[in-house]
Structure formats: C-alpha cells, structure tokens
Image (cartoon, helix red, strand yellow):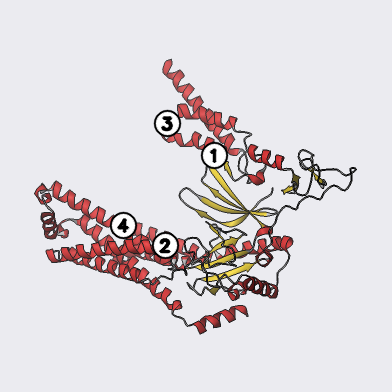
Amino acid sequence: MIRPVRSGVIVACPQCGATLPNDVITATVPLPCRHCSAEVQVEAFPALVKRWTPSGQPGEPLRDDSQASCFYHPDKLAVVPCSNCGRFLCSLCDIELASERLCPACVEQGRQRGRLDRLVTQRTLHDQVALSLAFIPLLFFWITLVTAPTAIYLAVRNWNSPSSILPRTKVRFVLAILIGALQILGWTAFLAHSLT
Amino acid sequence: MHYTRIPGKKGGLYRRCTLWMGDDHLLAVESTGYTEQYRRLYYKDMQAVIIRETSRKRDLGILFASFAFLAALPALIHLDPLESPLSLAGILTSAAFLSLLLVNLYKGPTCTCSIQMPVAVHGLPSLRRRKNVELFLSLLKPRVEKLQGKLSRDELRAGLYRLTVSSPQVSPMSPIFGGLEGSQPRVFSSRIHGLAFGFLLLDAALTWLSIHHNNLLLTMLNTLVGMALFALLITGAARQKRSSLPAAVKTLLWSGIMVFLSYNLIYWVFIYAIFILGNQVEVFRDQWSLFSAVAELNPVDHPTLIKVMMGYTITAFIIGLSALLALAMDRWPRKTSGAELTMRTSEGLQ
C-alpha cells in the first residue's frame, strides 16, 4: 500500500494518520500514538530532517573554444561522456543510473526497449506460463493435443526474452519443453496405434 | 544487480509479496505467479522506517486454540477416541491446529512495517513479524548510513524541532492521509460494534432456544433481532473503515457478517427444501403462512437443521465473545490518563 505524504508533515501514525509527536519519533522503543494508542516505533534516517530536493544542476557555460561542449547544449561545458553512446554531456543532461552515466536519449531508448533493468516495473514470467501450459492441461487430457505444442512454442519463443529481474534459472523452460515433448510423443503413439 | 532476499512473505490466493535488498535500493516484489511488479526504494531517499505493533499473534493464537479445542471436543466427550472415527479425526485436526499454534508462538510478535520516502509512505506487507523487521533493520541501517551518514538522537531532536518551527502551519496533530484532510483522525467510539456483537450473542442465544422450544413468539423475536443485527453489522462495517479500531475487531465484524449471511442462506434453503419436498407448497402463498409454518417446524425432526443451527450458535458465540473481549481490551489504554502517556513516553526516551 502506498500513501502520499502531505507537505509539512514529518511522520504520520500508520494506523490513524495523525502526525506523530517528536518524542515518539526519537524514542528507541515503541510508544503509543496519542490518537489511537497504536504502539509505534520510528527508525529515522538523516533524510528525514535534511529534506533535500535532488535536482539537476544547470550546466556551466563554455569559457573558450578549446573546451568540449555538451552534445545537447552546445554552449554548455561537457563534464562526462555517456556510458552507452559516448556523447559528451553537461551536468544537466548527465543521468546517473546503476553506476552508469547516461544521456536522456539512451535512458528513454533503454526504457522503451526494456533494456534498463533499473526502469523495469513489471515483467511477465514466460517460463512459468509455458510450464503451467504443459502441466495443468494434464488434468483434462484431451486439450493437451493443443496445449503441448503451444507450451513448447512459448518456451522456445521466449527463451531469450527478459524474465524476472530476480535470480532465476531456465529450468522451467526445460521442464515445459520436456513435458510438452512427452505429451506429443504420447499422442503420436496413440494415433499410430489407432490407425494401425 | 545482485539481490538478497529478506525473510518474510505475504501470500494470498493470487498474490505474493516479497522484499529484496539490492546494492543501492530495496526491491518490493508483488508476484501473481505469472507476472511480477517491482517497486524500488532507494537508500539515499529513505526518511524513516515506521513499525506498528499489531495484535495478530494474539488473535491467531486465540483462533488456533479455539479450533483445536472445538476439534478435540468429540474425543473429550467419548473418552475412548479410538472407537469413534469422528473422535479420531477430531484429534488429528486438533493436533494440526496445535502445531499451527506452536508455529505462531515460535514466529514471535507481529507488526506492520512501512518506509517513508520523500513523496509517499510505502507499506512492506512481507514484513509482518517483529523478528524479521529487526533483521531487516540490521541489514538496512548500515547501507542507508553509508549513503546518508549517521544521525544521532540529539541531531534528530534538533532537526525535528527545526522542522516543526519552520512549518508553523502544520499542527502537531494534523492528519496526513488523503480523505482525512482538514479534519482530525476519527477515533471510533466502537458503540456500534459493541451493539452488533451483543446482538450477535443474543441472536445465537435465541437460535439455541428455538432448537428446543420453537414457537411463534420466539420466531418473531428471532427475526426482529436478526434484522437489527444485520443493520448493525452493515453499519459497523461501513463505519470502521479508516477508524482506529483494532484490526482484530474489524476482522471479527467481517467474520460475523459472513457467518450470519451463510447461516441464513443455508437455513432458508433448507426450510424451502423441507416444504417443497414435503409437498407443502401452500405455505408459500404469502409471507404470514410461511412465517407460521416455520414457527411450527420442530427442528428435532430434522437432524441436519439442528447441526446447522448448532454450528451457527457456537460460531456466533465464539465471534461475539472474542470481539467483545477485544473491544474491552482496546478501550482500556484509551482511558489511560495523559500523565500515564507522558510517563510511558519518558520511559521510551530513556
């Protein structure tokens, strides 16, 4: 669950939403909220009291012609090259992402193509889909005639597709292909037997 | 990116929440089995971890112990459990609930955990046990301190004072969440809940009486109490949203609604089945005929109906009594004086 923070409010009680008094925020043990008596403990970090607002710094202007200029702002001083395309960037265009310095174009391109794991907010687990398609229809048997080849197709088609950003092996793909292949073999044997 | 899993998860029918720790951010993952959704919470932006203690461990303990006791009842009544298959099944079920009770005790106190970021407070549903939260904090703090630096208690106090002074428009008790803007957070009087659970007990008692002494007066009284109970339960459910009532009471109210509705559905389906199968369709010609026929019905002639009514009576009693107990326990700290709160606060500061 995500709740917006209203400006000016320091820390709110997670149960009733009332602003917690400073002594509750600074305490090292759970203390009751003055409103709802919920026992609340706060572990505060420096960002709570510093409240800085990160923002891009405007680039410095060029002092003479010998200095490298930003690709996107020719009158600004280049401070860093893009880690992906190598274009010179001023401090305004420099985007730090996963210890890389990227230009806005590369970030946008990476986001659209799903290449930047840092910007991914959702992934489909194709291996799980293929495995389920190979396994679950076994309960209904007849539909495996259609689902087994589909499971193999999905496994092969999505073998290299981006999957979960968490550690994950390809064992589900392998299992889906094996089970699908076994079902197809079974059907082939059954049809051959029926025809002869 | 290398991620380390933080112990604890919240599993549902179709969603599972887990928490992973990366080099410079936390990753909250919500998985359906076929898709995963990610939320990244960067250490450099984290402002605070907020932990609220909950009564979930106690509620689960009461629930498991009650079920274990109820399941063991047939075996306790028949002293030789091996002779009756029902008793044997009861003992096995009771053992299963007792093991759940032990697991619950082993896992320790429960809580909710959320992280305050610059623009939003993110709930971490996977962290529901205090033990996991302590481990999570021990892993998180060094990483946050590496990026933000350390913050002593004195610096925190001074910083909070500075923030409070520089934002005079914010009252110390002003609400934060949407929907409550401009008003004080609602501290619920819980009177409706008290009445609803009282009526649930009354309804259970009347149902119990009607098993043995069913008559027109009792049926009318039972119907009236049932209608009032339904109105109270619905009103309570509507009003408890965003109130400061304990989660246990809210859950028990929803359980009460489910039990009441299920019982009435099963009861009336059964009554209709009795009259239709008994070729007594003339009782459906008007409401009064049906009402009189129900009043004349002797539940003793229908063992299944008795089981349904007994089941409702026992469940309603357990829910009603547990809820009234939870309400009574919740009221106690609210009545504590300001001096006591100050004392507890100063203890915490020490």
| Chain to which the residue tagged by mark 2 belongs | B
Q: Could you tell me which quadrant the C terminus of chain B lies in?
A: bottom right
Disc 3 designates what residue?
Answer: A141
| Chain to which the residue tagged by mark 3 belongs | A
Residue found at the very far left of the displayed protein: B282
Quarter of image, res B160: bottom right
Residue closest to the eye, B141 or B131 = B141
Residue visible at 51% across and 75% down in the picture:
A34
Badges 2 and 3, same chain:
no
Residue closest to the eye, A57 or B72 = A57
Q: Which of marks 4 and 2 is nearer the N terminus?
A: 4
Pointers 3 and 1 in contact (C-beta within 8 Å): no
Query: Which mark, residue B86?
Result: 4
Quarter of image, res A48: bottom right
Disc 1 designates what residue?
Answer: A128
Pointers 4 and 2 in contact (C-beta within 8 Å): no
Q: Distance between the residues labelled 2 and 3?
A: 47 Å
Q: What residue type is labelled 2?
A: Lys
Disc 2 designates what residue?
Answer: B241
Q: Distance between the residues labelled 3 and 4?
A: 37 Å
